[in-house]
Amino acid sequence: MLFWQRLDDKIISVLIMTKNKLLNSNQLKLIAIVAMTVDHIAWAVFPGYPLDAVPVIMHIIGRLTCPIMCYFIAEGYHYTKNINKYTARLFVFAVISHFAYIFASNDFVDAKSFIPFYYGNVLNQTSVMWSLAWGLVMLRVANSEKLNSFVKVLSIIAICVITLPSDWSCVASLCILAIGTNRGKFKNQMFWMIFYVAIYSAVYFFAIDKVYGLIQMCVVLSIPIIYLYNGERGKKPKINKFMKWLFYIYYPLHLSIIGIINLTA
């Protein structure tokens, strides 16, 4: 309780100082895109898990992206006019992004690398878009009036297994579920997001790299930024439409460019 009280006090103080600078969804998405780009450049330029200040700081900045995207996937569930088209769109871009993600990966060897698990790896076999798309499905399952509790729990477990090999594993899906089912309860949304990321961080800490495991917890830096969301998109319809598609296009595009640079370097 003390942690959340301090968090509330800090958030309120930030809001007081920036009361005329609340962020709309377009601005938050741009923050996510910039942070993601910084993070991916770090992976390309500084492969592995270096402890130098520059790559560590770049990866810390990159922790802003996933929470913001999870938040807006959950928001999209409530605002979309056609949930089926929204779901299909996410899966289409998840498939497209798979090839771009693998191509940009430092583990890319040849065309066979596009086949999940071909070279024996289990984790990071596809992009976070896979986990985001299934996160929307998870939220739909949880809110379905046609499914009983047993089927819902079983489906959520199945989705966790399906998304386990992706970037951010099943954590991104679970964060979407937590944010979507606690809509309007910001403290609860952030509590469960941190809870799931903490599990991911612990696994990363013990199984991959201790420092980079701790870096995952820097998602907490996204909390005051998300809190500044004013619930609006933007005032210009054309810009809103552009921003609607920007992340879908930019994500695989910038990964493809990184892949080409890696290939020619």
Image (spheres, grey):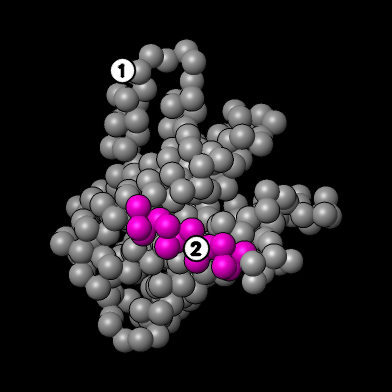
Residue 222 makes an appearance in the image: no
- Identified at 56% across, 62% down, the residue is 12
Q: Between 195 and 73, which is closer to the camera in this rendering? A: 195
Q: Position of residue 201 (x, y in %)?
A: 27, 59
According to the picture, the residue beneath numbered tag 2 turns out to be: 9
Question: Residue 10 colored magenta?
Answer: yes
- Give how far across and how far down residue 4 sits, in percent: 40, 56
* On screen, residue 82 above or below 233: above
Q: Determine whether 247 is above or below 104 in the image.
A: above
Residue 71 in picture, x, y percent from top left = 53, 48
Q: Nearer the viewer, residue 181 or 102?
A: 181
Query: Which of the two labelled residues, at mark 2 and mark 1, occupies the earlier sequence position?
Result: 2
**Residue corresponding to mark 1:** 150
Vertical relation: 61 (above or below) 23: below
Q: Is residue 236 left or right of residue 194?
A: right
Which of these two is toward me, 172 or 122? Answer: 172
User: Type of residue at label 1?
Assistant: Phe
**Could you tell whether 252 is left or right of 205 in the image?**
right
Quadrant assignment for the C terminus: bottom left
The residue located at (83%, 50%) in the rendering is 237
Pointer 1 local density, CA inside 10 Å: few below 14, some 14–19, many at least 20? few
The alpha-carbon separation of the residues under discs 2 and 1 comes to 40 Å
- The part of the chain drawn in magenta is 1-15
Q: What type of secondary structure mainly makes up the magenta span?
A: helix
Percent x, y of residue 21? 71, 67
* SS for callout 1: helix
